[in-house]
């Protein structure tokens, strides 16, 4: 975040972004960064997408972001993506999955 702040600061201090050269200039590099207390995925995990899907599904029900991704969560998310009515090829995928597993 510090590198992003320094990068932005180069733009925010440039005169061409202001009509008046005496305008107040933000200095993002001097901001205090506070990491929110939210659920974190395990090191080397590839569950970011699953966590975001879970959050999108559950965010309207609560304000707790300490969501845990498990094998059951991954399977539920995959099944929802395949079987919900908005998936136009869901039936074909289901048939192929049954064929593959039998």
Image (cartoon, rainbow, N blue to C red):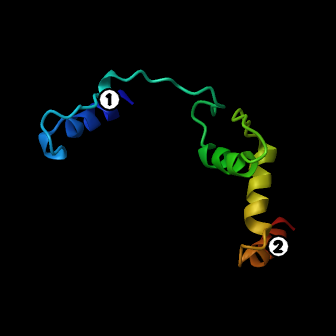
User: Of the residues under marks 2 and 1, which one precedes in the sequence?
Assistant: 1
**Relative depth, front residue between 90 and 65:** 65
Apparent side of residue 3 relative to residue 57 in the rendered image (left or right): left
Q: Where is residue 54 in the image (x, y as percent from the top left)?
A: 71, 47
Q: For the point 73% across and 73% down, which residue is it?
A: 86
Query: Which residue is outermost to the right?
Result: 102
In the picture, residue 91 is in which quadrant? bottom right
Front-lying residue, 14 or 71? 14
Horizontal relation, residue 56 to residue 85: left or right: left
Q: Which mark is residue 99?
A: 2
- Residue occupied by mark 1: 28
Towards the viewer: 87 or 44 = 87
Above or below, comparing residue 71 to residue 78 in the picture: above
Element class at badge 2: helix
Based on the displayed image, in which of its 4 quarters is residue 94 positioned?
A: bottom right
Residue toward you, 68 or 2: 2
Q: Residue at x 84, y 70 (%)?
A: 98
Instruction: Please name the residue shown 63% across and 34% down the image.
Output: 41
Between label 2 and label 1, give the one nearer the viewer: 1
Give percent across and percent down for residue 30: 32, 21
Q: Quadrant of residue 80?
A: bottom right
Residue at x-position 66% and y-position 44%: 51
* Crowd class of label 1 (few under 14; some 14 to 19; many from 20; radius 10 Å): some
Disc number for residue 57:
none
């Amino acid at each position: 975040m510090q590198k992003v702040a320094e990068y932005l600061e180069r733009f925010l201090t440039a005169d061409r972004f202001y009509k008046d050269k005496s305008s107040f200039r933000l200095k993002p590099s001097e901001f205090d960064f506070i990491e929110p207390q939210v659920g974190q995925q395990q090191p080397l995990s590839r569950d970011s997408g699953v966590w975001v899907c879970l959050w999108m599904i559950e965010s309207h029900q609560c304000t707790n972001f300490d969501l845990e991704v498990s094998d059951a969560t991954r399977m539920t998310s995959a099944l929802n993506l395949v079987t919900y009515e908005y998936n136009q090829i869901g039936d074909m995928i289901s048939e192929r999955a049954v064929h593959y597993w039998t």
